[in-house]
Image: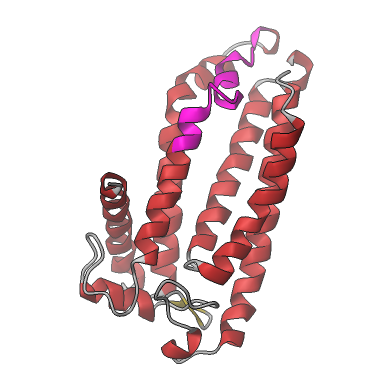
Amino acid sequence: MLNIIYYPVSIFLWFWWRFFGLFFGVSTGVTWIASIVSVTLVLRVILYWPFRRRIRSLQRRPASARSPEPFIWTLRPLGGWPIFVIQVLFFVGIHQVLQGMQAYKIENYVFSRSAIIFYNESALFGMKFGASVVPVQGRLPPTAFSTTPAQTLIVAIPLTVTAAVLLYYAANRTASLRTELGLSPHPTATAAAKLILPLMPLITLLFWPTLLLFYWISNSICTIYQCRLVRGIVEPADL
């Protein structure tokens, strides 16, 4: 039923994989990392587009004439739910596609058998993207890829910590911005976001494709930058 999501996501990922493969090779970790980051950035740019013109118009106004109204709809629980749903569906899609890149698969949506082999051969400082620290759902352990759990964890743990810190900071900056705009974030929802979101990288490390760590990192950086952009346009004195 969700193939309407999985196929477009796999097409976009395939496109960036082929593009970066021209420069770095189709079986290198750099190519797959750049592909995940690019797909994530493109989505965030698309979601940013609806109020891009308003931001430019605000930048041309004097500070006294600036208003936070163009951004409030994206931060209210009801006004911002479409963006939230789109991001959730995108994550589900990218998770499903990467989860399907298992070594024994013949094909995975638009990815051929050779692409799956290239994915499982790719690595970052010895951390094979096809391996799973905790083999679940048909995923193979690091030893199946001529590496060890220790080699995987040496690289994956710093990435996991980085992703968790960025997720917490992004949630904190979003809550602060809502407060500055007079939206008074719900204490329970804010606390849940700060507690649950940083746990997602740990779940990724243990059970999901480790390449998803770069999704969390790039998506959090985009959120932090967007909060900074809004705060820079709507100056504190005008809030």
**Residue 224, quarter of the rendered image:** top right
Residue 188: x and y in percent read: 74, 35
**Lateral position of residue 45 relative to residue 192, left or right:** left
Q: How is the image coloured?
A: secondary structure
Residue at the spot x=57%, y=55% of the render?
A: 217
Residue 92: x and y in percent read: 42, 51
Residue at the spot x=49%, y=76% of the render?
A: 132
In the depicted structure, whether residue 214 falls above or below residue 138? above
Residue 109: x and y in percent read: 24, 60
**Residue 83 is inside the magenta segment:** yes
Q: Which residues are magenta?
A: 65-85
Q: Between 71 and 192, which is closer to the camera in this rendering?
A: 192
In the depicted structure, whether residue 76 falls above or below residue 121? above
Magenta stretch, main secondary structure, is helix
Residue 235: x and y in percent read: 72, 21
Residue at the spot x=30%, y=51% of the render?
A: 6
Residue 199 visible from this viewpoint: yes
**Residue 150, quarter of the rendered image:** bottom right
**Residue 157, quarter of the rendered image:** bottom right
Q: Between 235 and 221, which is closer to the camera in this rendering?
A: 221
**Lateral position of residue 41 relative to residue 116, left or right:** right
In the depicted structure, whether residue 156 falls above or below residue 188? below
Residue at the spot x=47%, y=67% of the render?
A: 209
**Lateral position of residue 37 relative to residue 164, left or right:** left
Query: What is the tally of numbered marks visible in this picture?
Result: 0
**Residue 79 is inside the magenta segment:** yes
Q: Quadrant of the C terminus?
A: top right
